[in-house]
Image (cartoon, rainbow, N blue to C red):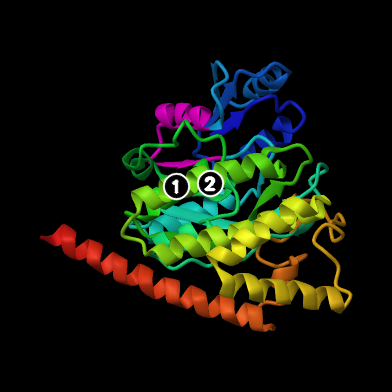
């Protein structure tokens, strides 16, 4: 499904990427969330040429409400979200459906993403997140996937989780993903099959809104997953505070950056101190920041999804620094905890 609000500038390319899917047996549901621009006209034009595109309209209710509307009318056993400014590689759905056929117990299947600019040119590869099958703690700590357009989910698992919480304007994808991974195993296709568009003025570029949304999401996660140790919740908050601190610093708001950095240090001093050391060491070596690395590469659809193209700064140094080795050791600890929680859950369900 494609939730769309005032997306006339990108919706055409987004829908074309879905129509071009090599997996043909799909329904493409466009949910026009009360758009006031030409979004509906674009959707209707493309729907006239492809009967698989269905359009539903509603008063503006936000992203979560639009997603729930799409979930409610979807007819397939699996559902997938495609944000109205993102792209799918033509082989995305086929690769995930084939994975699902071989692993019917998996309820949530994601793929890697590449960050793209307004012209759909690749800026850099996203992180190669490789989650274990049971990933409740890992999802809380790291987020299951970087963007909502990556996942293919069993519709029954989405319904079991209650869909998206309409009270959240951001982080709704994390809450849904965690709710599914709390009950079901997850899996991934190790290919760059999603083009995640970075745009100025988007919700994810509004640090203040993302921060307030994260605080609300964190409270929800702590309340609903009390079986997850408190240190996991603290680690999750610490790492995100550090990311917010870095975001404020990039924008020259050093006061807010310092406030967030102090909060990160209080929550997770071990990780935050190593992260700071890692960043300072890179700067001392003359390394460039992520912002200055935003040099456009080839068109997303022209790239081989099975091969890395422009790795991000952390990916370039994976395993080569003390910080990265510390992070990998932490992820092993989290994986062991998730495996133990899955055994406990299975034991309780068997009684």
Q: Residues within 10 Å of mark 2 (few under 14, many from 20)?
A: few
Residue under the point 44% across and 64% down: 232
Residue under the point 60% across and 62% down: 264
Residue 32 position (above or below residue 183): above
**Is residue 231 found left or right of 161 in the rendered image?**
right
CB contact under 8 Å: marks 2 and 1: yes
Specify the segment rendered in magenta: 64-81
CA distance for labels 2 and 1: 6 Å
Judged from the image, the secondary structure of the residue bearing numbered disc 2 is: helix
Residue 235 position (above or below residue 50): below
Residue under the point 52% across and 80% down: 329
Res 192 visible: no
Task: Give the x, y percent position of residue 168.
Answer: 51, 35
Residue 324 occupies quadrant: bottom right
| Image quadrant where one finds the C terminus | bottom left
Which residue is under mark 1? 219
Task: Give the x, y percent position of residue 46.
Answer: 67, 25
**Mark number displayed over residue 257:** none
| Viewer-side residue, 335 vs 12 | 335
**Is residue 224 found left or right of 124 in the rendered image?**
left
Which residue is under mark 2? 215
Residue 315 occupies quadrant: bottom right
| Viewer-side residue, 114 vs 234 | 234
Task: Give the x, y percent position of residue 228.
Answer: 36, 61
Instruction: Report if residue 191 lies within the magenta region.
Output: no
Residue under the point 49% across and 45% down: 217
Res 149 visible: yes
């Amino acid at each position: 499904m494609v939730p769309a609000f005032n997306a006339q500038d990108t919706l055409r390319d987004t829908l074309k990427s879905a129509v071009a899917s090599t997996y043909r047996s799909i329904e493409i549901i466009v949910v026009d969330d009360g758009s006031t621009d030409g979004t509906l006209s674009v959707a209707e034009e493309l729907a006239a040429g492809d009967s698989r595109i269905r359009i539903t309209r509603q008063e503006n209710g936000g992203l979560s409400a639009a997603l729930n509307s799409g979930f409610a009318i979807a007819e397939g056993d699996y559902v997938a979200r495609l944000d109205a400014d993102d792209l799918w590689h033509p082989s995305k759905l086929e690769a995930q459906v084939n994975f699902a056929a071989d692993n019917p117990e998996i309820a949530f299947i994601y793929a890697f993403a590449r960050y793209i600019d307004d012209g759909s040119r690749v800026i850099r590869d996203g992180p190669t997140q490789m989650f274990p099958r049971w990933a409740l703690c890992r999802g809380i700590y790291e987020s299951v996937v970087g963007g909502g357009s990556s996942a293919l989910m069993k519709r029954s698992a989405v319904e079991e989780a209650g869909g998206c919480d309409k009270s959240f304007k951001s982080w709704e994808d994390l809450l849904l993903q965690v709710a599914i991974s709390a009950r079901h195993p997850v899996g991934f296709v190790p290919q760059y099959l999603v083009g995640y568009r970075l745009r100025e003025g988007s919700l994810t570029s509004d640090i203040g809104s993302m921060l307030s949304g994260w605080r609300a999401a964190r409270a929800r996660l702590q309340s609903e997953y009390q079986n997850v140790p408190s240190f996991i919740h603290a680690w999750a908050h610490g790492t995100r505070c550090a990311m917010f601190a870095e975001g404020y610093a990039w924008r020259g708001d050093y006061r807010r950056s310092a406030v967030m950095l102090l909060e990160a240090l209080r929550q997770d001093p071990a990780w935050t101190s190593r992260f700071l050391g890692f960043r300072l060491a890179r700067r001392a070596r003359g390394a460039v920041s992520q912002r200055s690395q935003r040099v456009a590469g080839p068109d997303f659809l022209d790239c081989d999804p099975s091969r890395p193209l422009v790795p991000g700064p952390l990916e370039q140094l994976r395993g080569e620094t003390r910080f990265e080795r510390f992070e990998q050791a932490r992820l092993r600890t989290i994986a062991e905890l998730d495996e133990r929680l899955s055994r406990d859950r299975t034991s309780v369900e068997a009684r």
